[in-house]
Image (cartoon, grey):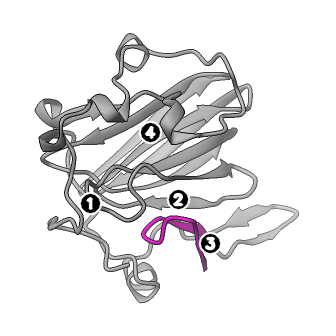
Amino acid sequence: MRVINTSLPEVKLIEPQVFGDDRGFFFESWNDLRYTEAGIKFPVVQVNVSRSAYGVLRGLHYQWPNPQGKLVSVLEGEVFDVAVDIRRGSPTFGNSTAAVLSASNKRQLWIPEGFAHGFVVTSETALFHYLCTAPYDHAGDANLRWDDPALSIDWPIRAPSLSVKDARAPLLAEITTERLPAYPAQLSGSSEV
């Protein structure tokens, strides 16, 4: 397994070691000991799978005050995946990092608690997989605008398909500080990265 630093120090891109031949392949998508040794330690308390069609954009989502970190990957297809630092007081507040995740490259992205997350599907369909540090909290569910000019995200699809909730999301500057995590985040289950 190789852990690659991104422009946001806490967000990590992971390339698992893949064993394969003409019959197929095998790789570990989670091994607590190996990830802990790589500096990524969190309890897996919920696992989600979503399927989306080309051009569907989901995000940018986060939970507060009950944050949820995510280790995400793609089981079928390809997505452009984004993490945004929304921790008030952070030196990288409002900055984002992105990676292409696909079934063929088998990469994973670690998005710690305190970051917003979103992705857009760039293949015909995509089957997206999430390992989460906390259960979904409807009362804490929040989002921010995918095309917020202050975030300068270079999405590969200009007119994505959005849910009503995501289409109506506020700009980061419109979110009150009490609805954003603090830096340094004093969060349970935080990565040791």
The amino acid pointed to by label 4 is Val
Pointer 1 or 4: first along the chain = 4
Query: Gap between marks 2 and 3, in whole Å?
Result: 11 Å
The amino acid pointed to by label 1 is Gly
Query: Gap between marks 3 and 4, in whole Å?
Result: 19 Å
The amino acid pointed to by label 3 is Pro
Residue 150: horizontal and vertical position, in percent?
49, 37
Query: Gap between marks 4 and 2, in whole Å?
Result: 15 Å
Pointer 3 or 4: first along the chain = 3
Residue 88: horizontal and vertical position, in percent?
26, 54
Labelled disc at residue 109 = 2
Pointer 1 or 2: first along the chain = 1
Above or below, 183 relative to 57: below
Q: Which residues are magenta?
A: 1-15
Above or below, 66 relative to 172: below
The amino acid pointed to by label 2 is Leu
Q: Residue at x 20, y 46 (%)?
A: 135
- Closest to the observer: 93 or 54? 93
Q: Is residue 83 magenta?
A: no
Q: Residue at x 30, y 41 (%)?
A: 62
- Label 1 with label 2: CB-CB less than 8 Å: no
